[in-house]
Amino acid sequence: MLLLGIDVGTSSIKVSIVDAATQQILASAQYPESESGITSLQPGWAEQSPEMWWQHVQQAILKAHATGNYHPADIGAIGIGYQMHGLVLVDKNQRVLRDSIIWCDSRSVAIGNAAFDAIGPEKCLSHLLNSPGNFTASKLAWVKLHEPERYEQIDQVLLPGDFIAMKFTGQTGTTLSALSEGIFWDFAEQELSKDVFAYYGFDTAIIPPIKKVFEPHGMISPEVADMLRLKAGIPVSYKAGDQLNNALSLNVLQPGEIAATAGTSGVIYSVSDILTYDPQSRVNTFAHVNHSALQQRLGILLCINGTGILNNWVRNITGAQLSYQEMNIAAAAIQPGSEGLSILPFGNGAERMLNNATIGAHVLNIDLNKHGSAHLFRAAQEGIAFSFRYGLDIMRGNGLQPSVIRAGRANLFLSDVFTEIFVNTTGVPVELYACDGSVGAALGAGIGAGIYRDEKEAFGNMKKLKVVQPSDTKRYDTMYQEWEKLLQDKLRTSYNS
């Protein structure tokens, strides 16, 4: 039996075919090869076409088939990981009504802040575990306010993974986990939030049927199966937001376990069995993939919008046409501290950990006689790692005391330079694994389809690639303190303006 895992990212779609018996990857493919664009019609806006995602999913699957490493007819279940918080609206004929307002879009910050004040901070935090902030419910409220004719055509409100599952199966559905990431769910009452729906004036009929994360969400239709050379009737048996899915791929499922990822955005994700929240909602809490009313498993998520997207920007702006590996080699030749060059990586919308401030990205202390592209490459990775430390300190202030962090050997964690900066800046060892979101989605599909008895069996063959230990924390702590002063200066300027 083979499992198909799909990771619907912001930059591209990645798929992996995994042998269920051995958990070995038989083939992986990405589409497109270059990063997908984000439409920004106004400053702070960010949209993508859901139909583009679906076209890219199809192309990635066919590209994997083209390797010839397996028989497509042997695929028995499909799992989906997806970019979180995106708003997808469909009418009664399952037609998309507008481009998705995606996770890094900032237009609804003021709407969410007003909801937070109106519902009440204590009520929001104790029931929703978050401020409505800039999440999916607030994005929907923006559509209701600014595009009323389109709002009236809505039949169902979907998250990106719900949409891709709908395209495979013709059925709509969602999960408690997805509703929690959209800030539609009341954890205290274990139901759709009466407060959110009443305040925004939403009808609960726009929410599709709620299913478990690990169970069939519909069967692939004959038309899609024929188009993609798959068997008709196989289930889409798992779907989860990308950071929850990344944690699953690292077998981070129990209280105290911690995962990190550094793709387009950066995340530290900790699992808790306590309904907990950050008083300022800088860190967010959602239902993890294995959460239930009987077994609370909450994912505490720190998100940094501007991580890999900064690395990509630096690559493009230098015009060097280097691969990321070549950039990492160049960065390694520069001494820690980048000879005084500093970068604040916050140029991808409002940052929740900065209290939803939009301060932009900044390249500081440039010496035109000294600094070159290699300095930019290293300073970018240092700035990204320092932003992780800033967020981790917030989590530590809320009681988190990590002893080790698990990460997939992917994206920025492919860089030995970045990994070294990360462990020395945070003071926490990192365990690296050969996995990614598409593999996690494949294994999730196996759990949801009953191919595995439980998570333990699904991850029975998981092995560490290596452990990276801190070795120079004193020097990196000094560098971080200087970087944080620059950040605080920008934050003061932002608040004063």
Image (tube, rainbow, N blue to C red):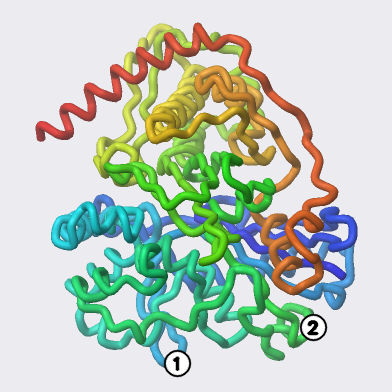
Task: Find the residue positioned furthest to the front.
Answer: 294
Inspect the image, locate mark 2, and give the three-letter code of the amino acid beneath it.
Lys
Inspect the image, locate mark 1, and give the three-letter code of the amino acid beneath it.
Asn
- The residue pinned by badge 2 equals 231
Residue 173 rendering spot, x and y as whole percentages: 51, 80
Does residue 358 appear to the left or right of 476 in the view shown?
left
Instruction: Identify whether 316 is placed above or below 130.
Output: above
Residue located 66% across and 33% down the image: 414
Q: From the image, which quarter does the C terminus lie in?
A: top left
Circle 1 packing at 10 Å, graded few (<14), some (14-19), many (20+), is few
Instruction: Identify whether 314 is placed above or below 338.
Output: below
Instruction: Identify whether 200 is placed above or below 409.
Output: below
Q: In the image shown, does 278 or 347 lie closer to the viewer?
A: 278
Residue 397, image quadrant = top left
Residue 315 rendering spot, x and y as whole percentages: 51, 34
Identify the mark at residue 93; answer none if there is no mark: 1
Q: In the image shown, does 320 or 469 lie closer to the viewer?
A: 469
Residue located 52% across and 57% down the image: 296
Instruction: Identify whether 118 is placed above or below 170.
Output: above
Mark 2: secondary structure: loop
Residue 483 rendering spot, x and y as whole percentages: 36, 18
Q: From the image, which quarter does the N terminus lie in?
A: bottom right
Residue 407, image quadrant = top right
Residue 480 rendering spot, x and y as whole percentages: 41, 16
Q: CA distance from mark 1 to mark 2?
A: 25 Å
Mark 1: secondary structure: loop
Residue located 35% across and 75% down the image: 98
Does residue 152 appear to the left or right of 245 in the view shown?
left
Q: In the image shown, does 218 or 126 lie closer to the viewer?
A: 126
Identify the mark at residue 65; answer none if there is no mark: none
